[in-house]
């Protein structure tokens, strides 16, 4: 976040930069509008809706992790409670005949997440770090388990269903077709994203960053870090609740799975893989993780393993996430020295892809071994029989050979990178 | 669901005493199993400051290695070999993973082990499948050790208890009374000084992590036959381990010991109790219909037994953030 | 990965069968867990359905249409189920089948109903082979949902009809998982036992959290203290395995009346505990049922798929689907649904069942069997334990009927 | 006129170990007061006690006549006392500009506001720019604080400390680790920036102390043995004994 918005702090922003800033947002909005016209099948609409919800959820999580430095293992609690609040509200609107149309329901979800955050947040945010992480884990388990006990509110493990089409209409939209729901989600996605972006540029947002960097020092510039964390927690809860409310509208059901550890783990995955240091990081992460989650399950039964591997790789080699990787290149682009790195990238692609193929082949071969010939591994149109020694040899060659060759090319990249960075430093684009 | 079901009062005095004795025994046994599991986690945290999310996964690896090796070389050799294997894996994780992540701070280390937990579960189920394995108690210990009020106590459970206590004592001695313990503790607080005194700090950390993992592996080999050996065993036991070590005070071995006992006993007695608000204060007016209040009113202590530890965790962290015996906050 | 398997079959089957297929295949969306904790069960179901589809295709398909099973992984998560269902419908699926988890089942039933109201002409039918929450055919019933498994109250009706004849049962302990299915087992058991055998004492009624208990010893201590001679439980998965293990460890000698002791891992656990013919299970059919047709079928199935036939009801489901389509002379879901209503059918394990029009619940004979050492005429063991299921009692369809509160909206 | 800082009979014990005994200190309004003393005398602990970082075991601390002992650091800060740290303590991942701006926000009344755009607050912007100008870091405004040189970080530290406009400023070894030239620059910076404010400074460099301070207190083993003008301190036999005696060992 910090670096991304530094330029915005300039008093007199150059007109070009202003234009670019609004241009990015406008492009995003146009893409959201056009997307369903290009891919119009029900399945892709559902996927887009899911991605939209995941983006709001991941951005809300980043208010905690990226902006305030709070690692939560129980963020889905607010998402879930938002979902339940929205479902109950929708049912109440229908049964009491209140004149509240569907597009306002996500706000109810947000309030659901917010109210719980306000209640629980004060004690939770007393501490940061590991203690906060552990309390969030405990609270998450507690709420998820309680949701199965408090049946009248949470409907047991079956959850609460609702019918979004029964609500009063707005502009004649029934919200029956998925397309209309998609636009509703897109609308709230834009609203929430703008709001969360704006939040990062308020005094509270900046002080949250200060609390993340150095909670002790913050006390000596007049701020109570506990209060700052509490506010951040409430905002995160509110936007998570909006995401939950959107999910409730999209699926017309809220159940205990919304609240659980898996949902909390997924949002952590998405946010971290995308990158917590930049505002757009979680957006990338949410798109990628949701896409993988939907797509990988069709191709492999061990998709969790790939998730784990990707996650470990990011933690170890690129703690800034994908956004961090991309933004590393910005000073080089500005200095015009990126071109000197690209050839070594191109060289590295081949052995790296070979290594990746080797790993995939190894994993899939082991996973499918019990099925034998009936279930071949299909890589780039080549079918490998998991039972045959040839497959094993191919996998071994790809992994071992790929690794050694790839390592050479990676070193080459490192050298080229150093040279390019020196150029960028000389030209004043890199410190 | 039968709202406010009246529970038949069939327990007379004698069975109450019986229930208390048996619950205490069960509570201690379960508590010691928890300690067996959390000791390694505590050792790693107290030495390295790393909260190892994958600890329960190492425990699972121990169980599966134990199962496989028992098939090949018998239970007793497996009891030695499997923890060594798990320890070796732990050392590799430290050497090639955590060491590189260390510079990014403890949160990054925590996240690394979080990802690892995911990967290990999937690898295990890939190799051994997802169904429970037929991992049995060794014939040598497959008999009832003693009988209390006509309830048998299997010798194997007593064996588990003995191992837990032995590990507790051994760890205390090693950490507090030996030179190795001193070096390890000094390496945590003053890594550079210890390095200048001629000790390889990196190797110390690697060994500590390996030992912690091996302890988890040992717990796996031993608990595998007593509980279910299955690819979701890590996920189902993982969270409670964190409750134990946070409750006891992060990094405190005696704390973990006491917390294990407390949680074991509390959970067991919660199951043994039949009370609910409805039985204490009389049923709610049924005409009020189902509501959250009615749910809370009618829920029995036994029903909520497994979530009691989490409640304890939240309460202790609010009241005493360093835990029972902890010395530092995070 | 299974999809590729299906594709392979789709390519090979016509060459072998010499059948001229009608243009469009009937795609059946199989929505169940294929990854995560429930995968072993989900994979088992998938193999069963693929076997059944092969069988139908080998006999010329349904009205000349080839049957194709398309797997979708729902990770036992209701929300994911709806995503996958949408994906399935997008891919031209008009029939979905699902079984694992009543919460998933309820979500899917609700989704299908809404989808059909909002998309007339593109109706989808939901064939339920294992989700047994009574709500699905009572207060939440739907015209678009058909259930072949006996709901939990039907099973309890049958079980209590058997138990009332056993004089040695005096004290019964109920222990169940704390969620809707466990709750319904518990309340049905209470209601029905009290009505049929007022002299039976219910000495304990326990609910424990779902799949969270690692050590059942405290519960066993309570059962023992209560002096119960029989335990009734709807527990499944690790909850039944750990429960039985703890009982064996403590030396508890009671009879166990269960719904799912035969599920994956259950037989292994019983064998380990040595509870020989003390664990009873209630099902709509089982390997050693004594019915020759069913036993031959079991043999062929095991030979080909290398697992026991967990779901005789899946056989009934697919065969009845074919029968209904042929009766309606159409593969249009609305017409098939109409034809299924009140359809009588000779079930795999013998005897007649019928799909009740009022609630779309299939009624069929129910079996009570016990697990233990096999007799001479019982060829099938489970999970290579050497032990198998032994027939204890068969409850005929009329004794396995319950009423419904369903008020169905028909198109 | 009430003293800016009044420390009365303050004691601090950690367990059984007493660090500060019967500490009495009075700093007048507008005075530049230095605290000196040998290593381990408790200078930083004194700073921590006054600024609320730790709480006295007994005794009381007053700021402009109000009791502040027992208050939390941010409460004391809001009453007009600001301090720096011996070890550089900035917001490493934020830019120089943002570091200073954060320190300006509370004093300008924006507190926890989440409805204002921080870039559109003219008085915050002007004040931040002025302070950057003052600490000579304007040309480094967009550099993350963690990437500054050591001397620059020390200057930023001072900038953050004075940014709130506190009337009482406490600097903990502001020139530690600096070269001679850097020290001179820092001293003139401190002199200029604390014009019209009360300054309490802990310093090892005696030329800085004697050049800057109006009054000096000498702390030995948690107790103030002498307090007075530089001239008085130079002549004080107890000080001589403490320092020479200390060095004679």
Image (cartoon, coloured by chain):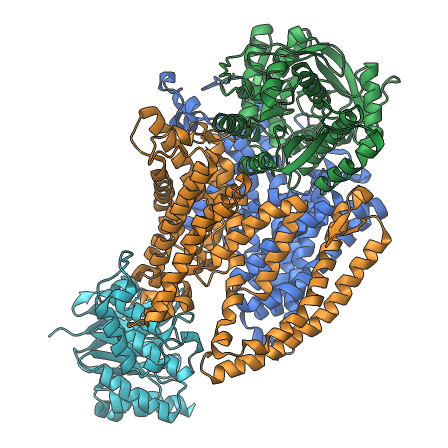
Chain colours: A orange, B blue, C green, D cyan
Q: Residue furthest right?
A: C376
The one of A301 and D223 positioned closer to us in this rendering? A301
Q: Taking C94 as reference, is D219 above or below it?
A: below
Which residue is depicted at the point 74% across and 70% down? A404
The location of residue D225, given as percent across then percent down, is 28, 82
Q: Residue at x 23, y 74 (%)?
A: D126
Instruction: Compare residues A354 and D62 and report the one nearer the observer.
Output: A354
Horizontal side, residue A52 vs residue B241: left or right? left
Percent coordinates x, y for residue A166 in the rendering: 39, 28
Residue B72 placement (x, y as % from top left): 85, 47
Please tell me which residue lies in front, D102 or B59.
Answer: D102
Seen from the viewer's position, the closer of residues B316 and B88 is B88
User: What is the quadrant of the N terminus of chain A in the image?
Assistant: bottom left
Residue B178 in view here: no
Residue A105 higher or lower than A424, as above or below: above
Q: Is residue A427 left or right of residue D207?
A: right
Picture coordinates of residue A331, whole percent (x, y): 48, 75
Compared with C131, A115 (above or below) is below
Whether residue C244 is visible: yes
**Quadrant in the rendering for residue C306:** top right
Q: Across the whole image, how many numbered discs are drawn on residues? A: 0
Above/below status of C347 relative to A386? above
User: Residue farthest to the left?
Assistant: D1
Q: Would residue A400 appear left or right of C376 to someone viewing this image?
A: left
């Amino acid at each position: 976040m910090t670096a991304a918005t530094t330029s915005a702090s300039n008093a007199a922003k150059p007109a070009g930069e202003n234009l670019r800033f609004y241009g990015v947002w406008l492009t995003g909005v146009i893409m959201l509008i056009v997307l369903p016209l290009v891919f119009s099948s029900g399945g892709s609409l559902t996927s887009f809706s899911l991605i939209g919800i995941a983006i709001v959820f991941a951005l809300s999580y980043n208010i905690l992790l990226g902006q305030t430095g709070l690692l939560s293992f129980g963020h889905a609690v607010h998402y879930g409670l938002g979902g339940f609040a929205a479902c109950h509200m929708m049912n109440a609107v229908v049964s009491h005949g209140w004149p509240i149309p569907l597009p306002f329901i996500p706000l109810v979800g947000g309030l659901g997440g917010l109210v719980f955050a306000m209640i629980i947040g004060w004690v939770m945010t007393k501490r940061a770090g590991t203690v906060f992480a552990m309390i969030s884990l405990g609270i998450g388990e507690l709420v998820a388990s309680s949701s199965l006990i408090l049946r009248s509110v949470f409907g047991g493990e079956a959850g609460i269903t609702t019918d979004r089409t029964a609500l009063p209409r707005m502009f004649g939209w029934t919200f029956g077709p998925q397309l209309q729901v998609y636009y509703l989600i897109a609308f709230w996605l834009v609203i929430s994203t703008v709001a969360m972006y704006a939040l990062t540029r308020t005094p509270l947002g900046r002080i949250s960053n200060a609390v993340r960097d150095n909670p002790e020092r913050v006390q000596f510039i007049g701020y109570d870090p506990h209060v700052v964390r509490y506010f951040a927690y409430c905002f995160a809860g509110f936007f998570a609740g909006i995401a939950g409310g959107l999910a409730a509208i999209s699926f017309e059901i809220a159940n205990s799975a919304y609240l659980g550890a898996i949902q909390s783990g997924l949002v952590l995955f998405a946010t971290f893989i995308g990158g917590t240091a930049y505002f757009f990081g979680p957006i990338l992460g949410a798109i990628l993780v949701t896409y993988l989650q939907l797509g990988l399950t069709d191709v492999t039964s061990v998709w969790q393993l790939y998730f784990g591997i990707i996650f470990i790789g990011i933690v170890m080699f690129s703690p800034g996430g994908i956004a961090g990787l991309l933004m590393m290149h910005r000073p080089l682009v500005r200095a015009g020295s990126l071109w000197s790195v690209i050839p070594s990238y191109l060289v590295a692609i081949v052995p790296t892809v070979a290594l990746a193929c080797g790993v995939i082949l190894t994993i899939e071969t082991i996973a499918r071994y019990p099925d034998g010939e009936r279930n071949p591994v299909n890589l780039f149109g080549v079918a490998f029989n998991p039972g045959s020694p040839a497959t094993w040899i191919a996998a071994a060659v790809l992994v071992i050979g790929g690794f050694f060759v790839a390592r050479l090319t990676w070193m080459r990249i490192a050298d080229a990178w150093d040279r390019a960075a020196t150029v960028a430093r000389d030209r004043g684009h890199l410190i | 669901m039968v709202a406010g079901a009246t529970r038949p009062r069939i327990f007379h005095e004698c069975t109450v005493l019986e229930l208390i004795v048996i619950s205490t025994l069960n509570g201690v046994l379960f508590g010691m199993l928890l300690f067996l599991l959390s000791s390694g986690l505590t050792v790693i945290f107290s030495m390295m400051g790393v909260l190892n999310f994958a600890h329960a996964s190492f425990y699972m690896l121990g169980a599966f290695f134990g199962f496989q090796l028992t098939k090949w070389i018998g239970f007793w050799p497996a009891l030695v070999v499997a923890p060594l294997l798990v320890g070796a894996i732990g050392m590799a994780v430290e050497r090639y993973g955590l060491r590189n992540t260390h510079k990014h701070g403890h949160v990054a280390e925590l996240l690394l082990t979080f990802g690892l937990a995911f990967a290990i579960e999937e690898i295990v189920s890939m190799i051994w499948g997802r169904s429970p394995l037929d991992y049995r108690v060794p014939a040598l210990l497959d008999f009832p050790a003693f009988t209390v009020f006509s309830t048998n106590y299997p010798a194997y459970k007593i064996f588990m208890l003995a191992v837990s206590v032995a590990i507790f004592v051994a760890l205390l001695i090693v950490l507090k009374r030996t030179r190795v313990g001193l070096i390890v503790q000094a390496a945590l607080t003053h890594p550079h000084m210890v390095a200048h005194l001629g000790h390889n700090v990196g190797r110390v950390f690697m060994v500590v992590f390996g030992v912690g993992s091996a302890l988890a592996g040992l717990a796996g080999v031993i608990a595998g036959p007593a509980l279910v050996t299955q690819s979701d065993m890590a996920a189902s036991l993982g969270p409670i381990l964190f409750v134990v070590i946070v409750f006891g005070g992060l990094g405190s071995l005696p704390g973990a010991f006491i917390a294990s006992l407390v949680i074991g006993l509390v959970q067991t007695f919660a199951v043994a109790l039949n009370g609910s608000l409805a039985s204490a204060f009389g049923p709610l007016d049924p005409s009020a219909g189902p509501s959250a209040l009615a749910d809370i009113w009618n829920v029995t202590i036994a029903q909520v037994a497994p979530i009691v530890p989490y409640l304890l965790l939240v309460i202790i962290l609010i009241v005493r953030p360093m835990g029972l015996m902890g010395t530092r906050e995070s | 990965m299974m999809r590729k398997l299906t594709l392979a079959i789709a390519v090979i089957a016509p060459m072998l069968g010499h059948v001229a297929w009608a243009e469009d295949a009937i795609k059946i969306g199989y929505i169940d867990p294929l990854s995560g904790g429930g995968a072993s069960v989900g994979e088992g179901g998938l193999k069963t359905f693929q076997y059944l589809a092969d069988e139908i295709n080998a006999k010329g398909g349904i009205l000349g249409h080839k049957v194709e099973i398309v797997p979708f992984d729902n990770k036992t998560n209701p929300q994911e189920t709806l995503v996958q269902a949408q994906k399935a419908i997008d891919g031209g699926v008009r029939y979905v089948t699902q079984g694992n988890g009543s919460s998933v089942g309820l979500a899917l039933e609700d989704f299908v109903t809404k989808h059909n109201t909002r998309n007339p002409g593109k109706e989808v039918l939901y064939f339920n082979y294992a989700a047994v929450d009574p709500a699905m055919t009572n207060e939440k019933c739907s015209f678009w949902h058909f259930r072949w498994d006996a709901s939990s109250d039907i099973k309890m009706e049958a079980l209590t009809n058997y138990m009332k004849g056993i004089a040695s049962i005096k004290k019964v302990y109920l222990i169940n998982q704390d969620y809707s299915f466990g709750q319904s087992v518990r309340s049905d058991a209470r209601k029905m036992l009290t009505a049929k055998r007022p002299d039976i004492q219910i000495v304990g009624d326990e609910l424990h959290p779902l799949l969270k208990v690692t050590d059942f010893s405290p519960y066993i201590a309570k059962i023992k203290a209560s002096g119960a001679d029989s335990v009734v439980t709807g527990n499944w998965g690790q909850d039944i395995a750990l429960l039985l293990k703890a009982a064996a460890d403590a030396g508890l000698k009671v009879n166990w009346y269960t719904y799912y002791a035969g599920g994956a891992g259950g037989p292994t656990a019983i064998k380990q505990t040595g509870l020989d013919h003390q664990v009873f299970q209630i099902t709509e059919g089982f390997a050693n049922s004594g019915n020759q047709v069913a036993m031959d079928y079991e043999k062929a199935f095991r030979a080909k798929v290398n697992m026991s036939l967990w779901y005789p009801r899946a056989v009934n489901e697919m065969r009845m689907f074919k029968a209904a389509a042929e009766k309606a002379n159409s593969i249009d879901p609305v017409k098939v649904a109409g034809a299924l209503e009140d359809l009588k059918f000779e079930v795999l394990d013998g005897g007649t069942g019928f799909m009740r029009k009022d609630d779309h619940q299939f009624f069929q004979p129910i079996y009570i069997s016990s697990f233990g050492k096999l007799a001479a005429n019982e060829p099938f063991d489970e999970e290579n334990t050497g032990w198998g299921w032994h027939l204890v009692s068969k409850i005929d369809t009329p004794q396995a009927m319950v009423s419904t509160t369903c008020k169905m909206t028909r198109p | 006129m009430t003293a800016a800082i009044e420390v009365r009979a303050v004691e601090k014990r950690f367990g059984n170990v007493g660090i500060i005994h019967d500490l009495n200190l009075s700093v007048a309004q507008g005075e530049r007061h230095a605290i000196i003393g040998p290593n381990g005398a408790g200078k930083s602990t004194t700073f921590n006690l006054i600024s609320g970082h730790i709480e006295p075991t007994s005794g009381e601390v007053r700021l402009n006549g109000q009791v502040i002992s027992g208050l939390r650091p941010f409460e004391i800060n809001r009453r007009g006392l600001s301090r720096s740290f011996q070890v550089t303590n900035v917001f490493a991942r934020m830019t120089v500009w943002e570091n200073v701006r954060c320190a300006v926000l509370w004093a300008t009344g924006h507190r926890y506001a989440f409805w204002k755009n921080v870039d559109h607050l003219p008085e915050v912007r002007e004040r931040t720019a002025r302070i950057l100008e003052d600490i000579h870091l304007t040309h480094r405004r967009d550099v993350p604080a963690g990437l500054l040189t050591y001397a620059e970080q020390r200057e930023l530290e001072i900038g953050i400390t004075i940014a709130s406009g506190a009337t009482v400023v406490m600097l903990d070894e502001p020139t530690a680790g600096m070269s001679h030239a850097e020290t001179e620059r820092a001293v003139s910076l401190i002199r200029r920036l604390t014009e019209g404010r009360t300054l309490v400074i802990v310093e090892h460099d005696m030329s800085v102390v004697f050049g800057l301070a109006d009054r000096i207190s000498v702390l030995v083993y948690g107790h103030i043995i002498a307090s007075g003008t530089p001239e008085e301190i130079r002549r004080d036999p107890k000080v001589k004994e403490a320092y020479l005696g200390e060095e004679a060992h």
